[in-house]
Every structure is written in structure tokens, then in C-alpha cells.
Amino acid sequence: MPAGKTLLFGVGLGPGEPDYMTVRARDIILRADRLVHFCKRGRRGNARVTADAVIAPDSAREIELAFPVTIEVPVEDEGYTGPIAAFYDEAAARLATEMEAGRTLAVLCDGDPFFYGSFMHLWRRLAHRFPTEIVPGVTGMAGAWTRAEAPITWGDDVMTVLPGTLSEAELTRRLRDTDAAVIMKLGRNLPKVRRALQASGLIDRAIYAERATMAGQVIARLSEKADDEAPYFSMVLVPGEGRRL
């Protein structure tokens, strides 16, 4: 990282409940020259909504980065990868112009910036050029297992984090080879994830968590969930059953 005044902050704001924001995150978003957030077109980003508990909207400070596509196009499709790569290039160039003028930028991130975060694509393009600091945050999965009152690992349990975008066969293989699991990126993948959990003998331990710690939170046994609807902020937890003392 280049020496000098930090210009780029990747700020983890936690799982959605503002009270889980760190003191460091709060301090940075209060004093940064620009607040940057990702969002869908025409909507405020969830991380920016979380930050409302600390700082009111301010058009002079806001930089909105609206994704050209989101879940409506499969991630392996060129109709997704092409536009998204160009979006990150353009966003990085826009932010570089701000930092070249000496302004500090706080990129607001759901959960932790380095855990399946969109910020990582900006970091890869910018951190070697500008002094950068990453502010860790409480992950969404930590918020989910806490609200579900489900200790995720006991004793020597091994936990595996899986994206639901894996093939059904790969999900099943990895689930059979672990003690505890968190499955993210559900969306249209939920039926496949459900089948993999059934095949691996874990369906009865699986907990569905939707918008954990946020308004509209849903926590339920996956076996009791009647439909296959799963929004972006949802995941499945499989608690371990390791050594208890």
C-alpha cells in the first residue's frame, strides 16, 4: 500500500442492525469526504440505509454506484460478466478522480468488505494506487446464527462456507465432508441447495435465515419453509454437533 494519508476506506457496516457497527466504522463515515455505496438502479443500497443511523443523506457527499445488472442474469453469462467488469472499471476510474483531488472515500459495505463483497473488485483496481484501509465488520452469517440462537461450531467442528451457485453434486459432496456449513447466494439456487442438504443427510439440521438482524427478519427450519423464494439477504445455516462439555 502506498504511504501517506489514507484516501480509500472499505468500511464494513455489519449485517444490517446499526448497533452492530464498529466504533471505527462510525468514526470513518462521519469524517470521510465522500460516502460511496453500491445499489440497484433506483434504490438505495442496504449499507447506506444502515448508515442512516449515524449520518443523514447528504447529496454533496454521496457517490452512488448502481449495478447495471444483478440477479436477473446468471453470473456465468457474458450478459453479466461483461457489463459488471465494465461497471467496476468505470467506478474505479470515478473514485480515482476523487482521490487524486485529495478527497477521502468511505465505501460502505454490508457485512465485512473482504467476505464476498463487491468492494473487493474496487480494492483490486485501486489499493495499489492509493493508501487504503479495510475496516472489518460483523458478517451476515454471524448475525444470522446469533439471531437463530444456533452455535455454529462446537469443539473441533470444521465449518465450510459454500456459495449456492455450485453444482448440486459439488454442494452434496462438500456438505457430506464437513461438520457445519453456511450456504450463501441462495436466490434461485434454493431448490438445488435443498436437494443437496437432503442427499447429504443434513436437511433436519438446516436453518433458513432471511434478512437476519434487519427489519423483516425470518428465521425458520428449512424443512418447514413451504416455498423456494429466497431474496439476496438470505442463507442456510447447518450447525455442527461437535464436542459439548
Image (cartoon, grey):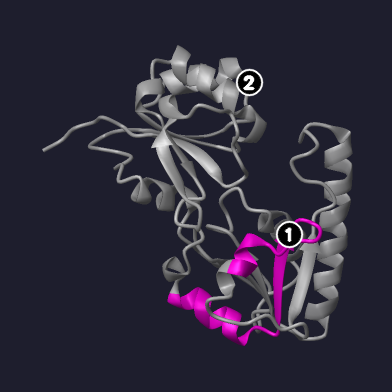
- In the picture as drawn, the residue positioned furthest to the left comes out as 245
Residue 65: where, in percent of width, then height? 79, 63
Asked whether, in this view, residue 21 is left or right of residue 50, the answer is: left
Q: At label 1, which amino acid type do we have?
A: Cys
Count of numbered tags: 2
The dot on residue 39 is: 1
Task: Report the residue at 76% width, 36% height from top.
Answer: 75
Q: CA distance from mark 2 to mark 1?
A: 28 Å
Q: Nearer the viewer, residue 68 or 27?
A: 68
Task: Report the residue at 15% width, 35% height from top.
Answer: 244
Q: At label 2, which amino acid type do we have?
A: Ser
The dot on residue 158 is: none
Asked whether, in this view, residue 153 is left or right of residue 134, the answer is: left
| Residue 187, image quadrant | top right
Residue 209: where, in percent of width, then height? 46, 42
Asked whether, in this view, residue 77 is left or right of residue 192, the answer is: right
Label 2 packing within 10 angstroms: few (<14), some (14-19), many (20+): some
Label 2: element kind: loop
Q: Nearer the viewer, residue 7 or 147?
A: 147
Is residue 28 a member of the stretch shown in magenta? Answer: yes
Is residue 40 a member of the stretch shown in magenta? Answer: yes
Sequence-first tag of 2 and 1: 1
Q: Is residue 5 above or below residue 228?
A: below
Q: Nearer the viewer, residue 16 or 123?
A: 16
Residue 123: where, in percent of width, then height? 70, 60
Task: Report the residue at 60% width, 34% height from top.
Answer: 229
Asked whether, in this view, residue 18 is left or right of residue 158, the answer is: right
Task: Report the residue at 83% width, 63% height from top.
Answer: 91
Q: Which residue is mark 2?
A: 167
